[in-house]
């Protein structure tokens, strides 16, 4: 059975589907396009979050909503214009990033330090 872009664990990344079989574990299946983008990112080696998003042709307004990014250190990254609504960002070091009024964290899961940081900042729209 294949689930569409939203499954039990929230939206699935970039066109992935979950295949479930009662006799085995669930597994992600990527479309050919998504698999090619993932291979291109992996082959390029270590890079910034922004460079990875560009190389993977990811849309910052939609492709990071609801994703589990827990533990990925985003410190030093420019996250302006990225929508992380509903994403799991625990342990991502949001305190060390550049954000502005276009960066969205609606219903995102954050660790205590990052949540406190976001609660204290005031972003002035241009």
Image: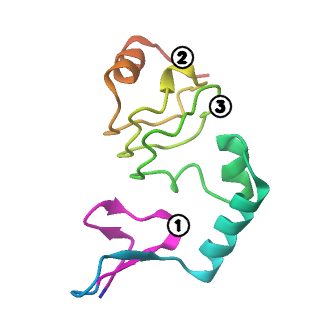
Residues tagged 1 and 2 counted as in contact (Cβ below 8 A): no
Under tag 2, what secondary structure? loop
The colour scheme applied to this rendered structure is rainbow
- The part of the image, by quadrant, that contains residue 10 is bottom left
Disc 3 and disc 2: Cα gap in Å?
Answer: 17 Å
Disc 3 and disc 1: Cα gap in Å?
Answer: 21 Å
- Say whether residue 54 is left or right of residue 124: right
Toward the left, the furthest residue is 22
- The part of the image, by quadrant, that contains residue 82 is top right
> Can you give x and y, in whole percent of width and height, for residue 111 in the image?
34, 28
- Whichever of labels 3 and 2 marks the residue nearer the N terminus, that label is 3
Where's the N terminus, which quadrant?
bottom left
Where's the C terminus, which quadrant?
top right
Which residue carries the number 2 mark? Answer: 124
- How crowded is the residue under tag 1: few (<14 C-alpha within 10 Å), some, or many (20+)? some
Which residue carries the number 1 mark? Answer: 14
Toward the right, the furthest residue is 44
Disc 1 and disc 2: Cα gap in Å?
Answer: 32 Å
- How crowded is the residue under tag 3: few (<14 C-alpha within 10 Å), some, or many (20+)? some
- Whichever of labels 1 and 2 marks the residue nearer the N terminus, that label is 1
Residues tagged 3 and 2 counted as in contact (Cβ below 8 A): no
Magenta stretch holds residue 13? yes
Magenta stretch holds residue 31? no
- The part of the image, by quadrant, that contains residue 35 is bottom right
Which residue carries the number 3 mark? Answer: 78
Residue at 39 percent across and 44 percent down: it is 85
Residue at 38 percent across and 35 percent down: it is 90
Under tag 3, what secondary structure? loop
């Amino acid at each position: 059975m294949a689930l569409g872009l939203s499954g039990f664990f929230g939206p699935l990344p970039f066109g992935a589907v979950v295949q479930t079989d009662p006799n085995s574990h669930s597994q992600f299946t990527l479309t050919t396009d998504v698999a090619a983008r993932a291979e291109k990112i992996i082959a390029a080696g270590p890079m910034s979050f922004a460079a990875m998003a560009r190389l993977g042709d990811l849309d910052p307004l939609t492709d990071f909503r609801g994703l589990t990014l827990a533990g990925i250190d985003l410190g030093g990254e420019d996250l302006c214009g990225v929508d992380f609504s509903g994403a799991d960002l625990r342990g991502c070091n949001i305190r060390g990033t550049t954000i502005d009024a276009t960066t969205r964290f609606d219903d995102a899961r954050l660790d205590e330090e990052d949540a406190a940081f976001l609660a204290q900042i005031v972003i002035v729209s241009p």
